[in-house]
Image (cartoon, rainbow, N blue to C red):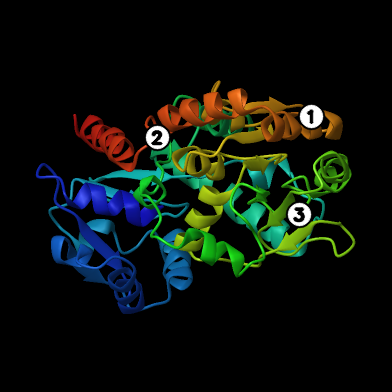
Amino acid sequence: MIINLVRELSARTDLSITVLGNHSDHRRLGEISEGLLDRCALRSFWAKPSAQQLVWYLTNLPKGEFYEPACDVVWCPAESYVPTSKAKLIVGVHDAAYFDEVTDKKAVSFRLQSWKWRALYHRLATVGAQLYTISEFSALRLESHFPELKNKIKVVHHGVDPLFLEQPAPGLEDRLTRWGLKPRKYVFLPGGFSFRKNGPLVEKAWPMISSAFPGYQLASLGGGPRNLSGCISLGWVSDSQLRDLYRGAMVTWFPSRYEGFGLPVIESMASGTPVVASRVSALPEVAGDAALLCPVDEPHFHAQAVSDLLSDSGTWHLLSSAGLMRADLFTWAKASDKLAQLFTARQQ
């Protein structure tokens, strides 16, 4: 996601981008996005990013201008802190999940990350940083936990990767066959079976769907319950494989309990496959009226919505067309435009 933003921003003629990181960061960036580093200047620190972050937080040194004296804006695209002298600090934050505690396990790692980000957000408020997040929902939730950030959080929605707008290469049916799937004969579950992705609801709702439509399978990313009939666990897949899975599915089912944005909704819409999702968190904001939205804790409603799309070709085609139009609203070009405006506004 960050790569897509940097790629769009670096192509603009009104901005000059310098990428700050260690040598490993620069090498990985070059491997992920060919040619991107040719459009950016590079500056390095020698520590690991986590260690450098700790130094910045504890000492407020070195300032961002130490690495790039002429910079007007120091942009941290994910939750982090770089002290500055005169340059404006703009930080991207994801969601309030670590403060809303939308997980079934209160693990030590969860508590540590919550504490770390709580300290970070208080610091960002203290130094007057400009924050942006990925949805109106996330902005409201963060402001509810950190009142000192009220009116300091802007919204820059995610975009959909252009990959999902492309037609897949020939041979889609053969590639799906390797997973034991047939085109338009399966429901795709990109969120898997974790508590946050509402796995317990899926376990209740899928048997209702499967009994009415025995010719369909449930294809799930990650692992899945061993005793759930008709479910195929796909593990983890590449982006191109993910595109194939969206394209080949009859329905994408995303009954998540909590999303700061909900990227699978837009990825599926861009691929032309209708979506059933929960009416909760940021999902209605992202889906609009181009998906079937259901109460988050009602398996019967989810089963009925999926069944409607499996049986009603008119509804299927209507939502497929609506989804394609909806996906056009969420592009990385539009996201980079909003971010560039934020850079400019902070310089005035």
- Mark 1 touching mark 2, by CB under 8 A? no
Q: Residue 94's x, y, as percent?
A: 52, 45
Q: What mark, if any, has residue 155 been given in the picture?
A: none
The part of the image, by quadrant, that contains residue 303 is top right
Disc sitting over residue 304 in the figure: 1
Hey, which residue is sitting farthest left in the picture? Answer: 13
Instruction: Determine whether, in the image, residue 264 is placed left or right of residue 166.
Output: right
User: Residue 8, position in %: x, y?
Assistant: 24, 48
Q: Amino acid at mark 3?
A: Ser
What type is the residue that disc 2 sits on?
Answer: Phe
Q: Using the image as rendered, state which of residue 80 and residue 207 is in the foreground.
A: 207
Instruction: Answer few, some or many: residues within 10 Å of disc 1's Cα (few below 14, many 20 plus, some between 14 and 19).
Output: some
Query: Does residue 132 appear to the left or right of 298 in the view shown?
Result: left
Query: Mark 2 Cα within 10 Å, few/some/many (few <14, many 20+)?
Result: many
Nearer the observer: mark 1 or 3; the answer is 1
Determine if residue 153 is in view: no
Question: Tag on residue 330?
Answer: 2
- Compared with 71, 302 (above or below) is above
Q: Is residue 339 above or below residue 241?
A: above
Is tag 2's residue or tag 3's residue first in the polypeptide sequence?
Answer: 3
Alpha carbon separation for disc pair 2 and 3: 27 Å
Q: Secondary structure under badge 2?
A: loop
**Which of the two discs, 1 and 3, labels the residue nearer the N terminus?**
3
Left or right relative to 227: residue 125: left
Mark 3 lies on residue: 194
Q: Amino acid at mark 1?
A: Gln
Q: How many marks?
A: 3
Q: Residue at x 68, y 39 (%)?
A: 258
Residue occupying image coordinates x 83% and y 45%: 210
Q: Is label 3 in a helix, a strand or a loop?
A: loop
Q: Quadrant of residue 219?
A: bottom right
Q: Is residue 235 above or below residue 91?
A: below
